[in-house]
Every structure is written in structure tokens, then in C-alpha cells.
Image (cartoon, grey):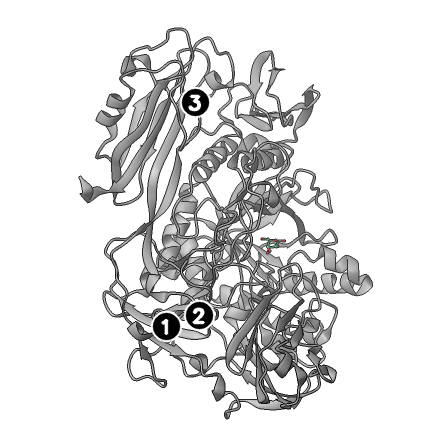
């Protein structure tokens, strides 16, 4: 082969070797990819919080929403369930997840941790780590550091072996080590400082070729970038002038706990916070969460984190788009991207436009100019003057001007569609109900053991089950005076968490629960003891291991006492050091009742015989057919108490019909946000519906297994489907007399195009009716629109003609369409429409 042949071969090799290798570095302005500074929007989608079958759609929706990057944590306890035994399959198929991001043409941020917090069981640490001799978590401790290094390298090498770092032509542009170590480091002093330095060095030495970050860690040593987490990050400055401003967790909502309300974050405030970060030079924003998803199985952290991790994110738990959050942020991203070149090439100049108003202007030498006009007043709109033009700013809002003249977006002005979701009953009957009662008398069998005194729960269960039985016997003499007086003795049990059911001679006597803030609690109750031998059986229940803090090896769960009987002739009878029999887990668990549909290791009873009796500690099972269609599915568990659910052997998670305690008095988007500000669902079960991934179902003979701790009516459990029920839109006409940002948002005062109102239903649906339509001066908001003093009579017929039977429709807001109901008055069009499955008409 000649010289040219060789050259040709080389060219063919280079072309065929796939994606190009890129460099990722950073400077004071931004992350620099292949020599170019980038302003990037990112979103958290945690791979085990959805199913692999959902990933592509979620990532595609994220891309459509204007994201450049997908962020995920790496879940150590999911990936290494026992030492050296790795799991990268199913929901833990990290390589598939990152490759799905790559195929979508997006970048990835891999937050390895391996401590991740994340409302995830034990903060992501495998529970076996607690039993490594001499370990001290998240500190300058050899056994801990060795394990952390081992796992970090395992992950980095796995990614490298699939060429997944951007330096290898892959999508990963950033990685995180540790998570919010700052507060810990402060507590630990020198040892914390040593650990941070060690962690940074260890991470950098893995040689990924892309930058590392540490969030909420002011002391992040070079070259690691310290980043910000919070509801707002505009006050954040990196610890060195040559590092960019990165916001790793812009909280899009907040997590829920059983017994608490749903926390929502208004999108106007989220958009305001993001614009405020960008206007002063921030160049990377990650929404935590963009899709929150579900804490399947026993992965929820705790205690008491709910199974739903919806987070009020732009994509809801079920993978459906949440409006107006999703589209309003999409418009924000589009507006900011128009400013990208100006923002990354220069620094802003800030000028005051009033007491609570400012302008940030990016004006580069090469003619690019972008400006942000902000009004921090929480009550009043402001009229400001900028570059000789007037602009009106709603309260607590920022307008974006990608050419320093025309407003293309204002954070408080939500022009996009709102949609409301509902859970629709479906005809998928559960049949062949059967029931099995946990056999308390079986305690003391081969898998149980005895010990004098009370043992810490996780040391015994190693978290293989939520449940640990503590059982002891007491002899009551027939001469005990309470037997004759009828004054029952009192049992007092001190628990370190999280829940407790007390059984006396096999009968449920009472329950007690801790809270997330205070895991310790005391059970105090009258107990029905008889003359002779009495069995006191205490079922201690873990509801997710805590996920925040340091020194995980020191945390206690379960009954540590004292345990005592009061009101006997001898006074107090302390049982703390009595002989206790221990049993890890339930019989239904260790005989694998949730997996078997055929020959059963236990005797099930026909459902009809027990339906009326609401027994505690009961297993229920039934069969059902998969419903047609592709809407997301859920189980309505409102007829039940507390327990766990499996479908075809897959755990949907813990359920608990705990009622939400809170203050749901409504909220305004304006003013600093905290989760308590905007609560929903007070007085209702925190979580009534439990996501059933479609991919877990077969066409027929699906097996539902429920374990109920307290008692409930399983025959009222039903499948529902989640779909869009109503959509609303509310758009103002542009009137030549308004010389404000509304005009300019449509390209300047000269002949602005007519704005349009858009409506669209979910997949497989179309608009079936127009519940409200008014072109004029309508009042109210979605769900409670009313006609105002001015109303075009044609409003309904125009909308009906354009929209009924369509999946999406749009109508121009103009007098030509409706006739002018009130000349010289600025009008708007408000519409509420119903969506229904397409086949209905
Ligand atoms: C952060 C933490 C996240 C998550 C979040 C609350 O402090 O880094 O992992 O726990 O709080 O949802």
C-alpha cells in the first residue's frame, strides 16, 4: 500500500471512530467545551426513580424544554448491594441511562457522591458500610476513605470503559464528588478539612478529563469548582476568581413526607430566581428536580419520605408535562439563550433604576448587547426608564432583553397554557382476592434468636426488612389486683424510631410513630394482660433510614428502651433487660409471598370470607388485567392504612394513608420562597396514588400483593389512569396604546403580530368541550374564570369551531376573529377546555 493508501486508511479510521473527542475546561465566566464558553441549563432526572422504558421520553421532554444537560446522582446502595457485588441492571443501568442522554444529543453531569443525600435511603450509602470495622462516615478515616475511593474509581472506570466522558467523545462534561460537605466540615474542623482535600485529590486523580465540582463546600480545593444549592443563588460567589458560577441545585419544588402537605413552588418565582442568577453572571443552572419520579421499593430516605418524589418538577412523577411550569421555563431558556454570546463574553454593568429596580447590561465590544431589568418589589409593579425607553415591570420580576431593547420574556408573566391532571377510574377489576394473616405465634422459629436486653434495629436487620419483632413474656399472678379492679396496667415503650405496633397476646393494642424531625417517640397505652403467661410483641418499623448528616455509623433505630409496665402490684416492672426474642422481617417476606402466584408456602384465605374484617398485619393478593392505552397508571390506596405494595414481584414502595397536616391558605408568587409558603392537600392523605409503571404489567394475570400493617379494605383498591382533564390559557391582546414590555415582547411597537392562544391535550386525547371562553375583560384564573364587564358573544362559538375534536388548536387574539365587544379597551382571551380520550367523539 502506498503513501496515499495509508493516508486514506487514516482518514477512514478517524471518520469511523465515531464522536470527536472534546475538551472540557472552565474559566471565570463559564464551562468551556471545545474552546467555547457555554451557558447551560441542566435538569436532575435520577435513573432509579423511573423505569428504563421511561428514560428516553423523559430525556426527550427535557431537551424539548430547553435543557442542555441531564444530571443524576450515582446511587451506591443500589449499585453495590453487597460488597463487591455490583448491580448495573434495570433501573440501575447507569451506562444505558448515560447513553440515552448521549443519543438525545445532551450532556451529562454525573454526581458520584458517593454520599448523595437526595431523600434516598441512608443518603445513598450501602448499609453494609456501617459494619466495616473502624469506620467513621464522611470523615478523615481510612476505612471510609478506602471504600469511597473504591466505589468512585469503579464508577469512573465503568464510564471510561464505555467512552462516556466528553474527553473521550462521550456526554459527561462534569462530575461531582461528595455532596454539601460544607456544614459537616465546619463541625469537624481540621479533620473535615483534611477529608475535603483528600476527596478532591482522589477525584481529580481518577483522570476523567472533565472538571469536578463540590456543591455547598466553600473550601473546595483547586481545581475543583465549588457550587451553590438553594432556592436562590444570586448571592453566591465561587471561592476563586477564576471559577465559574454554577448552581447545582435550583430547587424546583420540594419533597414530601408522609403526614405533610404537598409543597409547590410557583414558576414565576423559580424563573425569577434563575434570571436573577444569570443576570449577575451565573452560567450553569441545574433544576433539582426536573423529573422527581418515584421512590420505588424501600429506597425512600427518611424517615417518612413519601414514595412519590414528584417535587412539583416541570415533568411530573408520572412523566407527564406539568403546565405552566414546563413551558414557562422553556420560554425562559429560549430568552436566556438569545443572550448567551453577550453574557459569556463580557461582564455586566449594573445600574439602579429605582429603589428596588436594577438593570444589568452586557455589552460586548463586538456589538452584542443583552439586558435584564428587575423589580424586587414584592407588592408593586414599576415603570422604569432604560436606554431612553419605558418598561413596565410586574412585582418580583425580571424582564429579558436579548438586544438591550426589546423584551422577549418576563418571569412573572405566564402566557403559556395551564393544565390540570386527574386520576380517572378505569374498569380494571381486581379479582380473586385472597388474604393471609401474619402468624405472630410463629415467632421463635428457626430464624429467630434471643438476647437479654434491647438491640438496635439496623444492627439486627441490616436493613434487609423494615420490620423487626421484639417479643418477651410476662407472668401475671392471679392475685394481681388489677385483674379484680379492672384498672389495666400501662405499657411504656421508648423507641428511637420510626414506628411501632404493640401486640398483646397476638392482638393489636396500639401504635405510635415518630416524625421526620423527631424520630424518637414514646408509646404509652393500657394493655390487656391476663392471669398467666402473656406475650408482649413489639413490631418496630423503619420507614426509610435518615439521609442527612455525618457519622452515619452512630445512628440508632428501633426500641432501645426503657420498656416497662406500670400499675402492677409491684409498681413498675422494667422489661428493658428481660429476655427478648428477635425476628427479622415478616413471615410473608421471608417466604416471598410477593413473588409467587402458583403454589404458595402459606395458606391463603378466600377474600370473600375476610373482606369485612379489617385485620392488622395482613397480606392481600389479587389479579388484574392490564388496561388498554398508554396513559400512566396508579393504584388508589385510600381505603388502606400503611404498608407496602408489589406488582408482579416489583415493589411499588411503601404506602401510608397519613393525613397532611399543614397550612394551605394559598400563596403569592412574589417574595422570598420557602417550602412552607405554598402548601396543598391539607387534611387529605399526603399520598393517595402510587405509580404503577406500564412496563411492569403483562396483558393478563398481573399479581398485586399488598401488606397492610394496620387494617384496611383491600377490595376498594383500584387502578386509575392519569390524564389531562382541563387546559386553560389566558392571553392579552396587544394594543397600540400600551407602550410597555407587552408590546415589545412581540418585536417592537411597529405593527406587532397578533398573539395567539394555544391549547393542547395529552397524547390520545382531544378537546371535547369548551367550559369557558371570553374575549373581552374576563376575570379570575384557571378553574374559576368569570365573564367581566366586556365579553364578545362569539367567544364560545369561535373556540368551539376551532378546537372541538382537535388535540391542539390555536386562535389569534383579534377583533377580526371575535368582533370588537368594547372598542379602545385592551382585551384578553381566557379559555378553559376539557380534554377527553379521542375515541369519545
Ligand atoms: C440538598 C441535597 C439534595 C436533596 C435536597 C433536598 O441539600 O443536596 O440531595 O436532599 O437538599 O431535596
- Please provide percent x and percent y for residue 66: 45, 40
Of mark 1 and mark 3, the one earlier in the sequence is 1
Tell us which disc is closer to us: 1 or 3.
1
Label 2 residue near ligand 1, CB within 8 Å: no
Secondary element under disc 1, as helix, strand or loop, is: strand
Closer to the chain start, of discs 3 and 2, is 2
Q: Position of residue 414 (x, y in %)?
A: 47, 30
- Which dot marks residue 779? 3
Which residue is disc 2 drawn over? Answer: 708
What residue is shown with label 1? 620
Residue 567 picture quarter: bottom right
Q: CA distance from mark 3 to mark 2?
A: 48 Å
Relative to residue 38, is residue 407 depicted above or below? above
Residue that lies at the very extreme toward the right in this rendered image: 190
How many C-alpha atoms fall within 10 Å of the one at disc 1: few (<14), some, or many (≥20)?
many
Viewer-nearest residue: 831 or 21? 831
Task: Give the residue at x 68% y 54%.
Answer: 223
Mark 3: few/some/many CA within 10 Å (<14, 14-19, 20+): some
Amino acid at each position: 500500500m502506498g503513501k496515499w493508501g495509508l493516508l486514506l486508511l487514516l482518514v477512514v479510521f478517524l471518520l469511523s471512530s465515531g464522536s470527536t473527542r472534546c475538551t472540557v475546561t472552565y474559566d471565570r465566566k463559564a464551562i468551556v467545551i471545545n474552546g467555547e464558553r457555554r451557558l447551560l441549563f441542566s435538569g436532575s432526572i435520577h435513573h432509579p426513580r423511573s423505569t428504563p422504558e421511561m428514560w428516553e421520553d423523559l430525556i426527550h421532554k427535557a431537551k424539548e424544554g430547553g435543557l442542555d444537560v441531564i444530571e443524576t446522582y450515582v446511587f451506591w446502595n443500589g449499585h453495590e448491594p453487597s460488597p463487591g457485588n455490583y448491580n448495573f441492571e434495570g433501573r440501575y443501568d447507569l451506562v444505558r441511562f448515560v447513553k440515552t442522554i448521549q443519543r438525545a444529543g445532551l450532556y451529562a453531569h454525573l454526581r458520584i457522591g458517593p454520599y448523595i443525600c437526595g431523600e434516598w435511603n441512608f443518603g445513598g450509602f450501602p448499609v453494609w458500610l456501617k459494619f466495616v470495622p473502624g469506620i467513621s462516615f464522611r470523615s478523615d478515616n481510612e476505612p471510609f476513605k478506602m471504600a469511597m475511593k473504591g466505589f468512585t474509581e469503579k464508577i469512573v472506570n465503568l464510564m471510561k470503559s464505555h467512552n462516556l466522558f466528553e474527553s473521550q467523545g462521550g456526554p459527561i462534561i462534569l462530575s461531582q464528588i461528595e455532596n454539601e460537605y460544607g456544614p459537616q466540615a465546619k463541625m469537624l474542623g481540621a479533620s473535615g478539612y483534611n477529608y475535603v482535600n483528600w476527596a478532591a485529590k482522589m477525584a481529580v486523580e481518577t483522570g476523567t478529563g472533565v472538571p469536578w465540582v463540590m456543591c455547598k463546600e466553600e473550601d473546595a480545593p483547586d481545581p475543583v469548582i465549588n457550587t451553590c444549592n438553594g432556592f436562590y443563588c444570586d448571592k453566591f460567589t465561587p471561592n476563586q476568581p477564576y471559577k465559574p458560577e454554577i448552581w447545582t441545585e435550583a430547587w424546583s419544588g420540594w419533597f414530601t413526607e408522609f403526614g405533610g402537605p404537598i409543597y409547590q413552588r410557583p414558576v414565576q418565582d423559580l424563573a425569577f430566581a434563575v434570571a436573577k442568577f444569570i443576570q449577575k453572571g451565573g452560567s450553569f443552572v441545574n433544576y433539582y428536580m426536573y423529573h422527581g419520579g418515584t421512590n420505588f421499593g424501600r429506597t425512600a430516605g427518611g424517615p417518612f419520605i413519601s414514595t412519590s418524589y414528584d417535587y412539583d418538577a416541570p415533568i411530573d412523577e408520572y412523566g407527564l408535562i406539568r403546565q405552566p411550569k414546563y413551558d414557562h421555563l422553556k420560554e425562559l431558556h429560549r430568552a436566556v439563550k438569545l443572550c448567551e454570546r453577550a453574557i459569556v463574553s463580557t461582564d455586566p454593568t449594573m445600574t439602579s433604576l429605582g429603589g428596588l429596580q436594577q438593570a444589568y447590561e452586557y455589552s460586548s465590544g463586538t456589538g452584542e448587547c443583552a439586558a435584564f431589568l428587575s423589580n424586587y418589589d414584592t407588592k408593586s409593579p414599576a415603570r422604569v426608564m432604560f436606554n431612553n425607553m419605558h418598561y413596565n415591570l410586574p412585582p418580583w420580576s425580571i424582564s429579558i432583553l436579548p438586544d438591550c431593547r426589546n423584551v422577549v420574556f418576563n418571569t412573572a408573566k405566564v402566557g403559556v397554557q395551564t393544565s390540570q391532571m386527574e386520576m380517572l377510574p378505569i374498569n380494571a377489576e381486581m379479582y380473586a382476592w385472597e388474604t393471609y394473616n401474619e402468624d405472630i405465634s410463629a415467632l421463635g422459629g428457626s430464624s429467630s434468636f434471643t438476647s437479654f436486653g434491647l438491640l438496635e434495629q439496623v444492627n439486627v436487620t441490616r436493613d434487609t426488612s423494615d420490620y423487626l419483632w421484639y417479643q418477651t413474656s410476662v407472668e401475671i399472678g392471679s392475685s394481681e389486683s388489677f385483674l379484680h379492679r379492672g384498672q389495666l396496667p400501662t405499657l411504656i415503650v421508648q423507641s428511637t424510631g420510626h414506628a411501632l405496633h404493640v401486640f398483646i397476646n397476638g392482638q393489636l393494642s396500639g401504635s405510635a410513630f415518630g416524625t421526620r424531625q423527631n424520630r424518637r417517640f414514646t408509646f404509652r397505652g393500657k394493655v390487656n394482660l391476663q392471669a398467666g403467661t402473656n406475650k408482649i410483641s413489639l413490631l418496630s418499623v423503619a420507614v426509610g433510614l435518615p439521609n442527612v448528616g455525618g457519622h452515619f455509623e452512630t445512628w440508632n433505630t428501633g426500641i432501645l428502651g426503657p420498656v416497662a409496665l406500670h400499675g402492677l402490684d409491684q409498681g413498675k416492672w422494667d422489661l428493658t433487660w428481660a429476655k427478648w426474642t428477635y425476628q427479622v422481617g415478616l413471615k410473608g417476606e421471608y417466604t416471598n409471598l410477593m413473588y409467587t402466584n402458583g403454589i404458595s408456602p402459606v395458606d391463603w384465605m378466600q377474600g370473600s370470607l375476610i373482606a369485612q374484617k379489617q385485620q392488622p398485619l395482613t397480606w392481600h393478593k389479587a389479579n388484574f388485567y392490564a388496561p388498554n392505552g398508554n396513559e400512566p397508571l396508579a393504584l388508589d390506596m385510600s381505603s388502606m392504612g400503611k404498608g407496602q405494595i408489589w406488582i408482579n414481584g416489583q415493589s411499588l414502595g411503601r404506602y401510608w394513608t397519613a393525613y397532611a397536616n399543614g397550612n394551605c391558605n394559598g400563596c403569592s408568587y412574589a417574595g422570598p420562597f420557602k417550602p412552607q409558603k405554598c402548601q396543598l392537600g391539607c387534611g387529605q392523605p399526603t399520598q393517595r396514588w402510587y405509580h404503577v409503571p406500564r412496563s411492569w404489567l403483562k396483558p393478563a394475570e398481573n399479581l398485586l400483593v399488598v401488606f397492610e400493617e394496620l387494617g384496611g379494605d383491600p377490595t376498594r383498591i383500584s387502578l386509575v389512569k392519569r390524564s389531562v382533564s382541563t387546559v386553560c390559557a389566558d392571553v392579552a391582546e396587544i394594543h397600540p396604546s400600551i407602550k410597555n414590555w407587552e408590546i415589545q415582547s412581540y418585536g417592537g411597537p411597529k405593527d406587532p403580530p397578533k398573539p395567539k392562544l394555544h391549547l393542547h391535550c395529552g397524547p390520545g386525547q382531544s378537546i371535547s368541550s369548551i367550559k369557558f371562553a371570553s374575549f373581552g375583560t374576563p376575570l379570575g384564573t384557571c378553574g374559576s374564570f368569570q365573564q367581566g364587564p366586556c365579553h364578545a358573544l362569539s367567544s364560545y362559538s369561535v373556540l368551539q369551531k376551532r378546537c372541538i375534536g382537535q388535540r391542539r388548536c390555536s386562535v389569534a387574539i383579534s377583533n377580526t376573529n371575535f368582533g370588537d365587544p368594547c372598542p379602545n379597551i385592551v382585551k384578553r382571551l381566557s379559555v378553559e377546555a376539557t380534554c377527553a380520550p379521542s375515541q369519545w367523539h
